[in-house]
Image (spheres, rainbow, N blue to C red):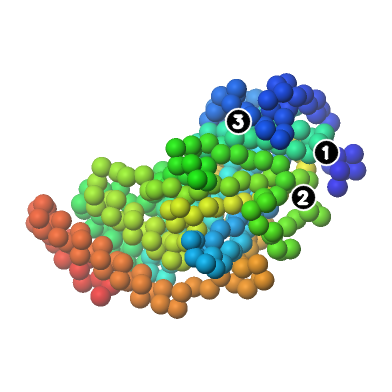
Amino acid sequence: MTKDENPRIPAGWIGGFAESDERFAYPTRDLGSLDMLKNMDNIGLLQRQQAILWPEFSWNTKPNAADPKRCFQMFAPDISRVGYTDQGRVYSIICPQQGVESPSLGSINVEITVTGQRGWVDEDTQALACDMSVEARVWFGHGYHENNTVKLLWRVIDGLGHEFPISKDKAIVVSTHEPGHPDQPIFQLSKGETSRFDAPAFARHADEAWSVGHIEVEVGAIKQSSSPVANEFNRLLMEVLNMSSGNMLKEGNVLTWNVWVNHPELVDQEEWQEHAEKWRKSIDVNHISPERWVSPARFHDGTLLPAPKDLVAREVAKIHDFRESVTKNAYRNGDGLRQRLINRLRRTVS
């Protein structure tokens, strides 16, 4: 539906920011003259928004293989938004979250966290152009405390004096960058669908969305902490996540998503602040947003991404390797309390 045909689009659109600098225009769309802004610093300037109701992600489940087996999944909708002024300057972008289940470690949350953004929206042409920098954040979701293995791992790591990724503010942080350019953390949100692949019908929303843009980002390395034990555990958790999710955040893989947005709406700045704060800390129970269906990961023909048949055994093996590594370090460097904690861990997941 076009702008003129949609009676729900509110009055007040002025436009003009997209045309304020000739460098902003497609096909080159150079936004380098704008500062990269933090998401929460300019909420008071937001006047209009477009909700990303259909964040359709895609990645290769077997990267670098002859048959990479691309899959598709819609992340939790009704979280993501693009916020901008009546003139069309973008000042905030909220990105979506998703969850993955591990048989051994419970539920794991994944969020694409925006660390910087700049850009424009043009309601007259239904186009947008933004630059972004993001980090992937990974932490244990609702129900982690009900898992005996996780509870014991938590006590052990807590006893050793290390943080455990039990919330977003303690999350594992995975860097990202422009595909093929690890020294460039800024990448583009551009108009239209990606040309990297043809999306299947179930991952397209041309009949219901206002417009669409696309993003492509390469997964980088896990950001290291000062603790070797914490780094070892984070590596374990990421390996478990990638086994369960089809290598979604495997280093070197390219994560692509088509951003299907709803029609423009007015911004209630207080509601925007509350919305951002709600999702800043955690995703809702069971990895869903209110009243919205979240799709499973599927291949192009619609078949579901299968869990590896030996997933539990592989997870247990990785937990065993971590246990042995921590045991050696604790006996080499730890005191009696640490040794007792490690002994308890050694009796778990055998």
Q: What element carries label 2?
A: loop
Q: Mark 1 points at which residue?
A: 9
Q: Which amino acid does label 1 sit on?
A: Ile
Residue 338, position as x, y percentages in the image = 15, 56
Rendering quarter of residue 188? top right
Residue 248, position as x, y percentages in the image = 50, 58
| Alpha-carbon span between mark 2 and mark 3 | 23 Å
- Which residue is at the far right? 5
Q: What element carries label 3?
A: strand
Tell me what residue is drawn at x 43 percent, y 47 percent.
Answer: 220
Q: Marks 3 and 2: in contact by CB < 8 Å?
A: no
Tell me which label, 1 or 2, sits earlier in the chain: 1
The answer to whether 135 appears left or right of 23 in the picture is: left
Tell me what residue is drawn at x 46 percent, y 66 percent.
Answer: 244
Mark nearest the camera among 2 and 3 is 3
Q: Marks 2 and 1: in contact by CB < 8 Å?
A: no
Q: Name the residue under label 2.
A: 209
Mark nearest the camera among 1 and 3 is 3
Tell me what residue is drawn at x 67 percent, y 50 percent.
Answer: 194
Q: Can residue 267 be seen in this view?
A: no
Tell me which label, 1 or 3, sits earlier in the chain: 1
Q: How many discs appear? A: 3
Q: Mark 3 points at which residue?
A: 118
| Alpha-carbon span between mark 1 and mark 2 | 13 Å
Q: Can residue 108 be seen in this view?
A: yes
Q: In this view, does 262 lie above or below 90?
A: below
Rendering quarter of residue 340? bottom left
Tell me which label, 2 or 3, sits earlier in the chain: 3
Q: Which of 337 and 219 is in front in this view?
A: 219
Q: Which amino acid does label 2 sit on?
A: Ala
